[in-house]
Image: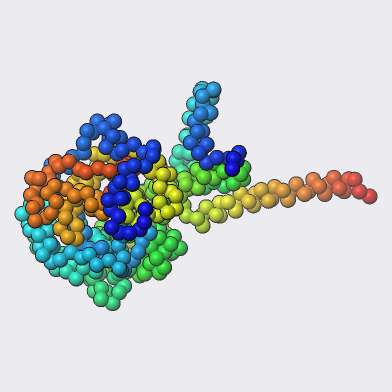
Amino acid sequence: METYYNPNDLSKFASMGEEAPELWELFMSYYSSVFKEGALSAREKALIALAVAHAVQCPYCIDSYTQEALEKGSNKAQMTEAIHVAAAIRGGAALVHGVQMKNIADKLSF
Amino acid sequence: MNSNENNIHSQVGYLNNIEGIKPFSDRIKEIGFNSLKSNPTITTLQVNVGKVCNLMCKHCHVEAGPHRTESMTKDTMSQCLSILMKNPIPILDITGGAPELNPNLSWFIKEAIKVGCHVIVRTNLTVLRQYEYTNMPEFYADNNVELVSSLPYYSEKDTDRQRGEGVFLNSIAVLSRLNELGYGQRDGSLRLNLVFNPGGAFLPPSQDTIEGDFRRILSKQYGISFNNLYTITNVPVGRFLTFLYDSKNLHRYMERLTSSFNSSTISRVMCRDQISVGWDGQLYDCDFNQMLGLNCTPAHISEFSLESFKEREILLGNHCYACTAGAGSSCGGVTSS
């Protein structure tokens, strides 16, 4: 069955450089710099990336950063907690917008 | 592929015919190695004293376990000792299976020390909890044996998933005993090194980073100390190859290994400094070639001469990518910074 998401497409990521090589090079240079050891460890960055991948619900990123987090020495307990952070922020973001709902409802109501 | 232990020939054929994976020998030609030769000096005789083990680890390339019967005889050990006596090979590295389950291990170690060898034993720790072997930690300490101990993770759940239920806490108990005997102290002579290997089809993390994690957590939670931690990449041989095949991870894992090929590791792969001896006296470049049945020439210890093994051509296959991926991998951990 055809789907919009194909796991083999992940290895074709670099084809995005074909029509805009300069932008691609700039992006990749930035991307690789972001994930180097810095004020945060490479492992912490991989866990952040894993959490963000879930927040943006990108299956390619989930695939890549699950492997990356494991290869940085994280275990499933740590990775699961990272995803809970993403879930908490997403859930909190939904809930806090409830204040807008209340404001508008209050404004419209007697 | 099945998990039958007689499938060594199909393993080699299978590994060397994976679609899209360039043969390892072709890959190293690209960086100037028409062949790979051992060094003029052999530092280590690595002896596999048998496939019998009390554990059945999921990544085990030996496919060791309680059901195995292969065990090195005293006569073959004597042939190993004769080589060590006659040749300048300073290190005897004993592996298995669980070496302790060979009934002649203690004798072998004592005789090797008499001929001036530094002796390393690769122990799974847990076997030392069994009644018959509870005296072995003291024996190791009395004979200044260096221990290399598998402990794939610093948590119970992750370790037991790979090595079996109860392994982590039994390992911790033995590590505590070894620490009491003086093993694993920073400036002590009794060396205790741990081995991390990934819990599946992925590469190990930075050795320095995970060593720091192990040191901090094992010290804080269990009061355990050790000297060094070695990260070892899982090699697609034996039980791990079966896992890769059954879980449909083989192609992805091989691509991961090949895409992480690090040319700087070639000069330091362990096969260049060692000779591997099988339980039956057969000779190989490494323990992985041993499990694949890739014999050296001459093929048996009875025909050994150091001259034949210096600068010999090493037998290569696609499993060799595991030793050259990322920071490299050997029985002593990474081979490139």
Left or right of A33 in this view: B310: left
Q: Residue at x 60, y 53 (%)?
A: A84
Point out residue B82 in the picture as x, y percentages from the top left corner: 7, 58
Point out residue B69 in the picture as x, y percentages from the top left corner: 24, 67
Can residue B288 be seen by looking at this rendering? no
Left or right of A77 in this view: B136: left
| Quarter of the picture holding the C terminus of chain B | top left
Q: Residue at x 12, y 58 (%)?
A: B80
Q: Residue furthest right?
A: A110
Point out residue B130 in the picture as x, y percentages from the top left corner: 30, 74
The picture quadrant where one finds residue B157 is bottom left
Out of B321 and A70, give the one closest to the viewer: B321
Number of numbered callouts drawn: 0
Point out residue B172 in the picture as x, y percentages from the top left corner: 36, 67
Out of A34 and B282, give the one closest to the viewer: B282
Colour scheme in the image?
Answer: rainbow
Left or right of B275 in this view: B266: right
Can residue B282 be seen by looking at this rendering? yes
Q: Residue at x 27, y 74 (%)?
A: B134
The picture quadrant where one finds residue B222 is bottom left
Q: Residue furthest left?
A: B86
Q: Residue at x 25, y 42 (%)?
A: B316
Decide: is B163 above or below A36: below
Decide: is B23 above or below B165: above
